[in-house]
Image (spheres, coloured by chain):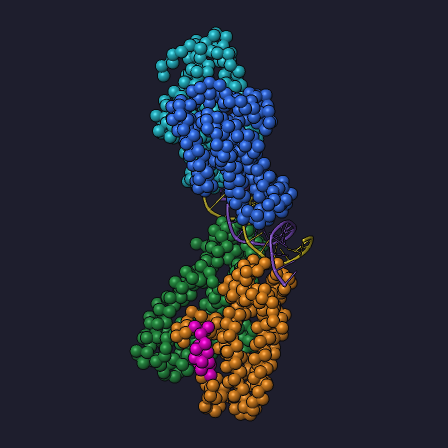
Chain colours: A cyan, B blue, C green, D orange, E yellow, F purple
Amino acid sequence: MKESRTKQSIIDAAITLFNTKGYAGTSVRDIAGRAKVNAANISYYFTNKQGLLEYIVTQFLDGYIRVLEQVLAQHLTSPKETMLLTVRALLRYQSENRYLTRFFYREISLDSVLNRELVPLYLSRERQYFQVLLRTGMESGEFHKVSFSVFMVQLKAMLQAPYLHTQYISEVLYTIPSDPLFLGGYAKEVEKWLEHTLFRTAGLVPS
Amino acid sequence: MKESRTKQSIIDAAITLFNTKGYAGTSVRDIAGRAKVNAANISYYFTNKQGLLEYIVTQFLDGYIRVLEQVLAQHLTSPKETMLLTVRALLRYQSENRYLTRFFYREISLDSVLNRELVPLYLSRERQYFQVLLRTGMESGEFHKVSFSVFMVQLKAMLQAPYLHTQYISEVLYTIPSDPLFLGGYAKEVEKWLEHTLFRTAGLVPS
Amino acid sequence: MKESRTKQSIIDAAITLFNTKGYAGTSVRDIAGRAKVNAANISYYFTNKQGLLEYIVTQFLDGYIRVLEQVLAQHLTSPKETMLLTVRALLRYQSENRYLTRFFYREISLDSVLNRELVPLYLSRERQYFQVLLRTGMESGEFHKVSFSVFMVQLKAMLQAPYLHTQYISEVLYTIPSDPLFLGGYAKEVEKWLEHTLFRTAGLVPS
Amino acid sequence: MKESRTKQSIIDAAITLFNTKGYAGTSVRDIAGRAKVNAANISYYFTNKQGLLEYIVTQFLDGYIRVLEQVLAQHLTSPKETMLLTVRALLRYQSENRYLTRFFYREISLDSVLNRELVPLYLSRERQYFQVLLRTGMESGEFHKVSFSVFMVQLKAMLQAPYLHTQYISEVLYTIPSDPLFLGGYAKEVEKWLEHTLFRTAGLVPS
DNA sequence: TATGAATGAGTGTTCATTCAT
DNA sequence: TATGAATGAACACTCATTCAT
């Protein structure tokens, strides 16, 4: 079921503008103007501006969770391999939705109905995913014994860094996060960190 | 020269509200209401809303740079010691201005005149500070040979993490960033990371 | 293509209020209130208050120039007859738009973008029209040899007088400029002046 | 009794600004800024903005009436001579107060308390002055029999023209109204008109 | 499905004015 | 006499949204 051209162009325009100017700093007329549609269409398709935001964020989080599910669906036996593939998949997903990712990680820290109600629902599923994975790895002896929370805050920082510290990241990798080449480079940095802090046995899984 | 009561209460209210609702999401009437002053005072003291933002951000960045200068003023001979004291001082400064810090690190990624003109001026001074420090440390043999850019993006991530990943950080440290106890805890994590990636000789400088 | 009811009632209200209170002395809420429409419609239809002014003034000046063109379109051979018909037509046009005329002649002397840029464009066309007409009349011998500038300043004063010296004019003509009867009366005064200062041959063209 | 420096500089600034931007278009801060005084002084010296306007207009009208009284005080016996001296004196007075004159003639047509109450008081004295002068002249046989109202509207137009039709007047007289040379030139035009329409005997009174 | 017209609430800002000093 | 601080009301304008078509 393809979205109507109008609906999709609204979404695309919204993501771009939310990313550069923030949600509150973007007006529905801005979005309609960039999407080259009538502003009333936004209310028609998404009820209101808040509805458009929820649609976009939900879409992003649905995709994020789907990435986790797709890794699980491969029925890998090694926790180490699962962790590596998960991280790679998430980095790829974020890179494919880079404007949305950047917007989400920025706006998530604001006080809003969205962040108090909708977002925690998804984040608790992410937390559960990694909790199970970590426990399994530690029980099997593949992972060092680490604090879950300490690991998580570091992992999240790793995942978000390229989208929050844009001033430096481009120099580090001689490229920008939008560049597909970036994926490989930054992913290796993250894997090095996993190797060092989590994995007991050396040797990377080939990417 | 003390700020007038009115001016200061506007600043305090603005920091709180910018932090929770963002700059664009905060109206001057919101600020005036919370500060319990007339909204016209904002124009009176800061010309306009944008002027208030600039005043606040400038104040924050001035303080940030002053922290660096104060460490330099101690004329320490060891680069390692200098680096440690710098990081501790910056963490303390951020903790003392935690709402402002959080707001700044979020809003800095938006497209605005402020971020295109005023902020880079200050950030280039921070960059220069660490560039000199790193070069000195590497020449004296106290530091590993590392890429400046890679080091910086990691350092910035370390400094900003407590303010950007607030969902997890409280669990990690059994406390919140506002808690003074937090300082010691998180600072130790950062120092451990420095020890590991930058310093050639073991042994922490007593805090 | 008729203007929408809302747009036209804004224009009508604006002309009335600009005339009695001046442009700067009239607020958009005044206009909206008198027009019995929402104030936001003014921005909707005219971008802003200044745009409404420009629309109104442009409309007036367009009509003014059109009057001149319509006289020309009659292909009269006698300069004297052309001059008389022109003056009568302009007086009729002004009488039909008396509030606008009065407002325009007052506000034109203020320092504004409008008066520095838009208005001179139209006035230069009026000047050209009379320049050609006067030259033709003088070459054919129907007109006395007069200074163009002296003639113009007097003609303009004649045309504007009923709208600028309203305190006396009503007494002079035992009527007000809005009265259609006025037209004949004042027009005759102007023609008498033309007869006296410009025309070499006696005898009025029947009106 | 000299005005205080502050008060006088407020008056000067107000006249300039009222002339270029109109009364409603000028803010008390504009005036204070140009006068280089604190805005509160305006309320202190003139109660409020309206009071400043009244002060200025009253000053102008007082001077205007004083001009008439000074001609009368010369106890001239010839109505013709009186009329000529009056017109010359009024033109000189206006030229000496040209900004104020221009502002007054423009703003006088607006609907305001000032124009409904204060101004008519003075204008009725001007009317009476000319009424007596005209009657005397006509009874003595020096003046043609003319309609008072018709004469007045023409006279007023003559007096105001240089200040209302500024676009053309400069070309006519190869000078600007502010130029002292202008006085003589324009005065002669007006006297020619008087000679033609009012005076029975030829021969100008030497100026 | 899509739009132009229209609105009420809210935006940042300026206004003339007051008042303690 | 003169001022900086402060205010409430008003300013022009933008906002997200509704609705008839």
Residue farthest toward the top in the current orientation of the protein: A140
Q: Which residue is drawn at 59% across and 65% down?
A: D7
Stretch of the chain drawn in magenta: D176-191
What x and y, as percent, mark residue B151? 42, 26
Task: Give the total of numbered labels.
Answer: 0
Point out residue D202 in the picture as x, y percentages from the top left corner: 46, 90
Depth check: D14 or B185 in front? B185
Quadrant location of the C terminus of chain B in the rendered image: top right
Which quadrant: the N terminus of chain B?
top right
Magenta highlight on residue C183: no
Residue D151: percent from the left, percent from the top? 52, 81
Q: In this view, does C173 lie above or below C61?
A: below
Which residue does the image show at 41% across and 60% down from the upper left? C117
Depth check: C2 or A104 in front? A104
Please, what is the dominant secondary structure of the magenta stretch? Answer: helix
Q: Which of C22 and A139 is in front in this view?
A: A139
Q: Is residue A113 above or below residue D130?
A: above
The one of A149 and A131 positioned closer to us in this rendering: A149
Task: Residue D184: say if magenta.
Answer: yes
Give the residue furthest to the left.
C139
**Would you identify the image quadrant in which residue A177 lies?**
top left
Residue C145 image offset from top left, x and y in percent:
34, 80
Residue C145 visible in the snapshot: yes
Residue at 52%, 88% (x, y): give it: D80
Is residue D24 toward the left or the right of residue A143 in the image? Answer: right
- Asked if B207 appears above or below D7 in the picture, the reply is above
- The answer, for residue C16, to whether it is visible in the render is no
- Residue drawn where x is 54% and y is 67% of the image: D12
